[in-house]
Image: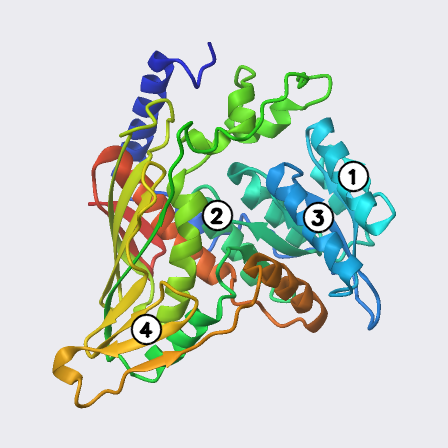
Amino acid sequence: MSQIEGSEQIGQSRRAFLAETARVAGAGAVLASVGLATGSTRVPRSSKSGVSLSKGEPIRMGVIGCGGMGRGHCGAITNFAKQGREDVQIVAVCDVCDSHLKQAVDIVAGNQGTPPDTYREHEALLDRDDIHGVLIATPEHWHSQHAIDAILAGKDVYCEKPMTLRLHQAMELREVVRAHPDRIFQVGTQMMQLPKYKEARKMIADGMIGKPVWSQTSYCRNSKDGEWNYYRIDPNWKPGVNLDWDRWLGYLGPREWDPKVFARWRRYKDFSTGIIGDLLVHQMTPLLMALGDSVGWPTRVIASGGHYIDKDMENHDQVNLTIEFEGEHTMVVAGSTANEVGLENMIRGHMGNIYLNSRHCEMRPERIFADEVDPETVECPDIGNDQDVHRLAWLRSIRTREQPMSNVEIGTKIMVIVDLATRSMWDGHAYAFDSATMKATRI
């Protein structure tokens, strides 16, 4: 039995997690070291220059992480070139698993005609001087290291969500990105390109609903067999032969080989924040973008969670979050992998409410303001696959050098929510965040 699966080990792991939370909280520096919170000298301030891209030249890309999500990106991006939507080539792919690499190579070669070079170690890929940008689709605990290494190697970066696994990693990555403003960094959060959120942002900025006082959203789905168990376990995986388990584990090792963790890491709390980081970020990020700068940083987060149906999953199958912001706004969020009926997606203001459940953006005034505020509905176009639009936006930014809206700042704000909510669920406490010191503390 693996160290993740055994009930005794799960209990020990949970106790260790709570002990670490208490230790860091007691030191008054939860989630981030003092150096990272106040401006660390640990982060290198110099890096390689980026590879220049001439007009009419194809964008040359590398993909780090060729699991299910990475291979999906490989297919989508090479299809852009095939369809004439963008002149782009995937010239290199990297993964610790040989079968993942082979599948990625087959996808890329099948679409673009030429196979990419393959790497086991991401450092070797990043050493290449012919790559403009890299897409990172590795497990969450590797996101920050891969992104930082790529930026310092002079590459533009598309980093899958959540931006990092823990908040202190987000703070360090944010510092590196801010120290290299010439680099393009985009978080791969879905739904950010949907027009309805941009229209809602305009309505709020124009004062149509008055002060936005609270918002709500959710990501709920259901399964009979347990969330993320659909990821296949390959009986041919052999650590040390065709898979580098120790490198995959990174700082979370050493551990006994466990194919369930390797394939379904989102189910385990050491490797993922589960529903919050994998699902809810898709809803919270565009909602926070729509609310605009007026709400500021999260200041207080409290969350509860349970294992109501999926008793075998270490992460929770039901979560409920309440997030307060410094601009006097509260966001209520629900997530479930045990019931698919979610909350209405909407923003409530003092004078009116914005409804975002459909493709369109609808504003209805509050009853007492019906004579002063006219209702308005903006019918938004169907943009097709919004994830494809998001990928194309990053590629366009590589050409134009225009910074993307799904950037490190909003990514870090979301990570404040993700990490504090995760800790709140596990230890039962509320957590506060101070944007002046960039520190979080347990309340």
Res 235 label = none
- Tag 3–tag 2 contact (CB < 8 Å): no
**Mark toward the start of the polypeptide (3 vs 2):** 3
Q: Which residue is mark 3?
A: 75
Callout 4 secondary element: helix
Q: Residue at x 56, y 16 (%)?
A: 257
Amino acid type, label 4: Ser
**Mark toward the start of the polypeptide (3 vs 1):** 3
Amino acid type, label 1: Val
- Say few, some or many: other residues with alpha carbon within 10 Å of mark 4 (under 14 / 14 to 19 / 20 or more): some
Disc 3/disc 2 C-alpha distance (Å): 21 Å
Q: Quadrant of the C terminus?
A: top left
Callout 2 secondary element: loop
Q: Which residue is mark 4?
A: 294
> Which residue is outermost to the right?
114
> Which residue is outermost to the top?
1
Q: Position of residue 431 (x, y in %)?
A: 25, 47
**Mark toward the start of the polypeptide (4 vs 2):** 2
Q: Is residue 215 left or right of residue 73?
A: left
